[in-house]
Image (cartoon, rainbow, N blue to C red):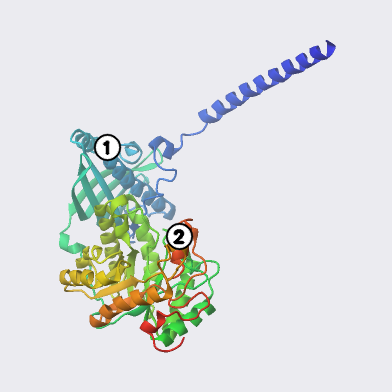
Amino acid sequence: MKINRTLYRIFLLASFLALNGLILFGISSAWTYLNTGADRTSMLHLHEDISATYLPKVQWEIAMNEGRPMEEQTLGEIERDYLSAWQVRNAAYANNVPYGIADYYTDSMRTELFKITDLNLKNKITLQTTTIEHHPKLEFYSTDGKLVVLTDKNVLAYEEVYQNENLITKRKLLSDYKVMLLLEDGFWRVRQLVETALPEETLEVASQVQNLEDYHFKGINYYPQDTPWDMFGSQFNDSIIEHDFKLMAKMGVNSLRIFIPYESFGKEYVDQEKIEKVKRTLDIAEKTGLDIMPTLFDFYGNYSIHDWTMTNRHVEQVVEALKDHNAIIAWDVKNEPDLDFESRGKERVLAWLEQTVDRIRKIDTKHAITIGWSSPEAAVNLTDKLDLVSFHYYRGAPEFESAFNILKSKVTDKPLLLQEYGYSSYDGIWNGFSGSDEKEKEYMGTIQKVVEKENLSHMIWTLYDFRNIPTSVVGRLPWRKVRQRHFGLLDDKGEKKPVYDIFFNENP
């Protein structure tokens, strides 16, 4: 009985202490909340970082402005709040819910924006829009440091108009703006934004691309044997690459397609260490007489307008770093983007591709641009934007000539490239015993007769049978992984397979 009373007292004491602890925790949490300003992004119902998905190119024109000299820190704050004003406006137009407008616009500007969102909501209209680049110039900075006037020239934007969730129209826009900003409550708010639209023809970039009509690709899609789909990762080995490049040059190959995956290269903040690995690879290619076609967006699949500024930052860093290398022959924008037509929407994918081509062209006017379509049928898209029309083929060999002739009849003004083709020689249970070395040779031989007859540029998939295929590429299903391992001209020991004799007469 005495033991029970003791346990009862211990329980009451523990309960009392726990209750007081909870009360003190509640008081301290309330005190912290009342003494901390609300997080700005929480108030706006936006992402954790307001600029996380909006990084347009900004080039300030530095000149002597009227009034007070501009401080470097203040200029950074002006740019931050000015771009945030564009971002919250874009977000408001996208869903007609004007979160954040009050933080970045003064009363008079808010009223105008609210009128637009209310009218669009009433008519079930939404706008998907983004700006691609800005060129601001500071014109005036008041003596009291609370008013700024700037001009923003050649603001490149893209807009899609939807009604009842159906796309009505899309357009590229180029405009100049006169902008007034006021410093209120620590924010630079837009007081005035006056637009002057510029003629559409000023959007085009003059191309000086080398003529590829007379260039015949006899190429290979290349990965090192032990690091497929991860050529520039931690196991990068330039000695292996040099060995393979010399081998392919000896085989008579003149060009290679390599891959620069968007995410693994750092997306909008490109990994400069990997860029240096690419440069070393290009140096080896130049030394061995091989031309290189980099594919820039392997394993990318978003395409959202609100993602464009980030992919543009990626393009600028990669293309600017590599464009002057003698080994570059052309840029391949994206690997098989048409496979995303159904899941992402054809119009959205094509719009992203078109503006990405424009962005590459603006950085590099000399090299050809292509897209690696997954089939001859898909390759009719955007031919007017490209210098080289590329397509892949993995279907029945007897049907290849017909499919190619249809494409050739539709594309008469651009050179054609069979950018990927191949056949798995795997003959096990996971392929229904349908493959073999001899079937691979027969398949490739049938296609090669058409290639030679048409003098068609071509790039084979691939040099080696791979020992391992990353799960991230084809998933875990064994019949997909094992089949993908056996597309090489050389087996996993580096010995030539029967298919090798179709393309080359000498031993490697």
Query: Of 28 and 60, which appears nearest the observer?
Result: 28
- From the top left corner, tell me how far across and down residue 507 is, in percent: 45, 88
* Picture layout, residue 504 above or below residue 148: below
- Residue 435: percent from left, percent from top: 41, 69
Q: CA distance from mark 2 to mark 1?
A: 48 Å
Measuring from the top left, give residue 134's x and y in whole percent: 30, 56
The quarter of the image holding the N terminus is: top right
* Residue at horizontal 25 percent and vertical 78 percent from the top: 450
Q: Is residue 109 visible?
A: yes
Mark 1, other Cα within 10 Å: few <14 / some 14–19 / many ≥20: many
User: Quarter of the image holding residue 121?
Assistant: top left
- Label 1 SS: loop
Q: Earlier in the sequence, mark 2 or mark 1?
A: 1
Residue closest to the far bottom:
506
Q: Which residue is mark 2?
A: 479
**Amino acid bearing label 1:** Asn
